[in-house]
Amino acid sequence: MKSPLHHVLRAGLVCAAAILISGQSVRADDDDATTTTRIKFSDPAKPGTLNASLPWADVQITGTNGDEIVVTSTLAQKGKKEDRPDGLRRLDDEVSFELLEKNNTATLRVSGDNAWSAHGAEFKVQVPHNTSLVLRTEAGGDMKVENIDGDIDISSVNGEVVLNDIGSSAVVNTMNGEINASFKAAPVKAISLSSMNGEISVRIPGDSKANLRMRSHNGAILTDFPETALKTRAENSVRHGEAADAPEAPEQPEAPESADAPHARSPDAPPAAEIARAAERAARDAQRQAQRAVQQAQRAMMSDQMIIPGIRIPHFAIPAFGGKSVVGTLNGGGVDIQLSTMNGSITLRQNK
């Protein structure tokens, strides 16, 4: 279930895209047209990597038994001349995509005078099963990855991320979108899935061995693993916006200074123990003020940060304070699995 914040962010991104696109469509001649291109890794005998960095597009990547990378897109391939039925020749650069390969690393990217006008583009990509993926979207777009045994690294600003039949590790960070992941084998490498605004649902085999850390600021943490297999405990955390204040000591009078002997104690001065308590209280006050300042800065970063097209939004981290946190071990412990969201539920299920 998508929250109001999800719709607000999506609406804002759509408005920004409308300004940038300025009426230009993905394909001026035929919105249903597609272009397909193929490429091979330099050394097909070794696992390769696909890097895809796209401003705003929907991406579907499927692992196959083949030895090629096959890309089908609603964009034209860079360098291909457009045959127009009216006989006119285009002088500006049409927004297009290019697929390059070097040293067993393939790169997929959008090019053209205004790459942001590729909003609404679709990419369907086939790669060998053992390919590792590094996928980035700068503004939005849904991502779906299926049947991949290589490592997966995804960073998305706005869009749903779906992982099906994954055989290795996955690191996914999304600003605004749900994450659904299903692993076909017990993970042997660390997994980290985090969303600023979206539910997280994970399925792993029942015999998986893992150390778990799950945290949600606004949502339930659920599982269908039995208590005999998944042993958990709740972690104490400070509520959002509050500091872990120690009880304040009664206010103590300050020690008066002696003009004649600065280090001498006058008969009316408080004892040394009272002076020490006053100093401790002042230190606690300073610590509380510093904690509140840090929390205010973190909240401002999360709530007021603008999404500016063309500027990479830095990797965000779920704040260490507030919310509900559960840690535990699955089948005695093993690889690290971390699931965290600011706004949404977390569900861990057995992949039967």
Image: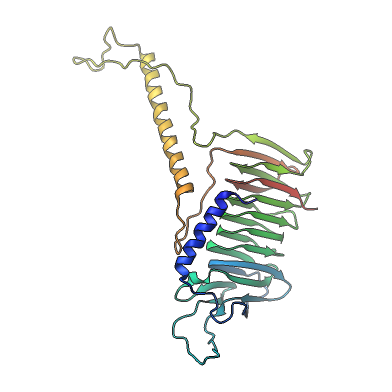
Residue at left 56%, top 72%? Answer: 108
* Image coordinates for residue 6, horizontal then vertical, percent: 57, 53
Outermost residue toward the right? 352
Q: Does 211 appear above or below 76?
A: above
| Residue 46 location (% of width, % of height) | 66, 71
Foreground pick, 257 / 123: 123
> Residue drawn 45% across and 64% down?
310
Q: Is residue 311 left or right of residue 336?
A: left
Residue farthest along the left direction in this orientation: 260
Q: For this view, does 58 lie left or right of residue 257?
A: right
Residue 302 placed where, x, y %?
A: 49, 47
Specify the quadrant of the image occupied by residue 7: bottom right
Above or below residue 172? Residue 232 is above
At x 48%, y 25%, the residue is 246
Report the side of 118 relative to 286 (left or right). right
* Res. 124 visible in picture: yes
**Viewer-proximal residue among 84 and 262:** 84
Counting the numbered discs, the total is: 0
**Residue 230 picture location, percent across and down:** 74, 41
Answer with left or right where residue 115 lies relative to residue 235: left
Tell me if I can see residue 131 in this picture. Answer: no
- Above or below, comparing residue 182 to residue 214 in the picture: below
Describe the colour scheme in one phrase: rainbow
